[in-house]
Image (spheres, rainbow, N blue to C red):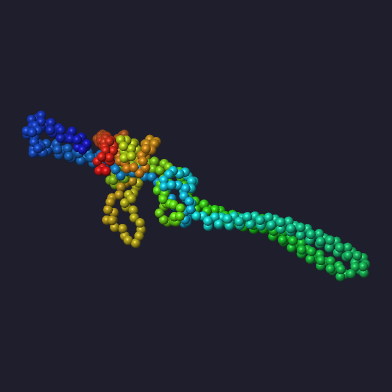
């Protein structure tokens, strides 16, 4: 209607003024309900054509859409393992901080595994103490065996000297007995050294490796025990938490509720523009939005991302060929809009529906010295027509509350 009224000022009104003041025709006389088409046919025809051209130019170069939503991320509340709920820490709805528990599963099995692993670690600590005692014991055995052998060697040397001086003083059998005893005592020394080395290997290598394995098993058991307590990963708000004590939960089943992080959805708006706007939408375009949750307010925005594909064309490989006719609804071009000023959409409720305008700018082309006069004039007109769409958006922002509250039929 606004475009029609604007175009009539340049077509219909001049035609009527010519008929009225040049030809002397008046409404109710020569110009009646039945002759108005014949009398004002040039103005009416020109008004319709100019209106269509104006609307096409405005909507193509300065696109608008009602498919605008402030999406926000939600985190499903599910456990990492199966189990029966033993305790809940939150209600149906409420705020929560990162690391705070939400609910706990029955952990008797996991607790038993932790106790077993902890006992194994304690057992290895005791075995380490025993192994150190064995090292000390082996040192004593080596010292005793060495002393006994030295005593035997001294006695053997004395009797060998006596036998050399006078063979009749010492029986040769006694010398052989001492030699055999010394050899046996040497074996005892070697056995004691081997026992000491074995004990030292247990202290330095075997028991530490066994303890490290036991501690790893303890850590794994502790991780499994910690999984029974489901905690919030971020600050946010728990909503629709219906889990109660005694319920059996499974990660593959539906979530027990959702966690909405703080600040979710306050980065930008997602708008779906018509596919024909793909050549116009560019990153850096200025835009405006008005949302149902913030009536009478127009928020300046800027285009920060333009998706280079349309979601309606996606398919997943399967056993049947995709028929293009199955895509009944044409997809939209997804565009991300962020506020031009910090905190611009803080008051917009996440999930709110909005209306968005995007305004193309040809300033760089106009400023280019290679651009001709007539082309620059046309581009000036195109950029100036953004005022019409901006005015329409403000009228929409004005009537949006009345449309939702009064004329929606609720």
Q: Residue furthest left?
A: 29
- Judge left or right: residue 332 versus residue 147: left
Quarter of the image with the N terminus is top left
- Judge left or right: residue 174 versus residue 329: right
Q: Position of residue 270 (x, y in %)?
A: 35, 44
**Foreground of the two, 65 or 117:** 117
- What is the quadrant of residue 165 in the picture? bottom right
Q: Position of residue 252 (x, y in %)?
A: 42, 56
Which residue is located at x 50 percent, y 53 percent? 228
Which residue is located at x 84 percent, y 69 percent? 176
Count of numbered labels shown in the rendering: 0
Which residue is located at x 41 percent, y 41 percent? 263
Quarter of the image with the C terminus is top left
Q: Position of residue 322 (x, y in %)?
A: 31, 58
Q: Position of residue 267 (x, y in %)?
A: 39, 41
Residue 36 visible, this orientation: yes
**Foreground of the two, 369 or 224:** 224
Residue 62 visible, this orientation: no
**Foreground of the two, 201 or 284:** 201
Q: Is residue 23 above or below residue 148?
A: above
Which residue is located at x 30 percent, y 49 percent? 331
Q: Is residue 14 above or below residue 117?
A: above
- Judge left or right: residue 165 versus residue 127: right
């Amino acid at each position: 209607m606004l475009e029609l009224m604007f175009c009539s000022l340049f077509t219909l009104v001049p035609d009527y003024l010519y008929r009225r003041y040049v030809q002397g025709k008046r409404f109710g006389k020569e110009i009646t309900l039945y002759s108005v088409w014949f009398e004002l046919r040039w103005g009416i025809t020109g008004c319709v054509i100019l209106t269509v051209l104006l609307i096409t130019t405005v909507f193509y170069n300065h696109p608008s859409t009602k498919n605008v939503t402030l999406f926000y991320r939600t985190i499903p509340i599910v456990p990492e393992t199966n189990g029966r709920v033993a305790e809940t820490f939150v209600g149906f709805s409420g705020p929560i901080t990162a690391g705070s528990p939400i609910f706990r599963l029955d952990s008797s099995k996991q607790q038993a595994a932790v106790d077993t692993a902890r006992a194994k670690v304690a057992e290895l600590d005791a075995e380490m103490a025993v192994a150190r005692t064995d090292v000390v014991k082996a040192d004593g055995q080596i010292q005793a065996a060495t002393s006994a052998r030295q005593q035997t060697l001294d006695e053997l040397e004395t009797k060998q000297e006596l036998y050399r001086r006078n063979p009749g003083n010492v029986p040769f059998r006694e010398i052989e007995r001492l030699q055999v005893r010394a050899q046996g005592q040497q074996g005892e020394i070697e056995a004691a050294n081997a026992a000491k080395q074995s004990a030292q290997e247990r202290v330095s290598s075997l028991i530490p490796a066994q303890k490290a394995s036991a501690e790893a098993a303890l850590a794994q058991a502790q991780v499994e025990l910690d999984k029974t307590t489901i905690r919030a990963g971020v600050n946010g708000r728990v909503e629709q938490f219906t889990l109660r004590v005694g319920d059996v939960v499974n990660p593959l089943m539906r979530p027990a509720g959702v966690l909405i992080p703080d600040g979710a959805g306050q980065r930008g708006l997602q708008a779906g523009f018509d596919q024909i706007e793909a050549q116009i939408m560019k990153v850096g375009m200025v835009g405006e939005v008005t949302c149902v949750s913030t009536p009478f307010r127009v928020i300046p925005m800027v285009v920060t991302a333009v998706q280079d594909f349309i979601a309606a064309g996606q398919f997943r490989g399967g056993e049947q060929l995709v028929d293009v006719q199955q895509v009944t609804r044409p997809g939209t071009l997804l565009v991300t809009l962020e506020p031009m000023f910090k905190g611009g959409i803080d008051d917009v409720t996440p999930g709110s529906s909005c209306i968005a305008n995007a305004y193309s700018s040809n300033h760089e082309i106009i400023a280019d010295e290679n651009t001709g006069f007539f082309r620059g004039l046309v581009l000036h007109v195109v950029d100036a027509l953004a005022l019409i769409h901006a005015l329409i958006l403000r009228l929409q922002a004005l009537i949006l509350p009345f449309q939702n509250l009064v004329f929606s039929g609720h």
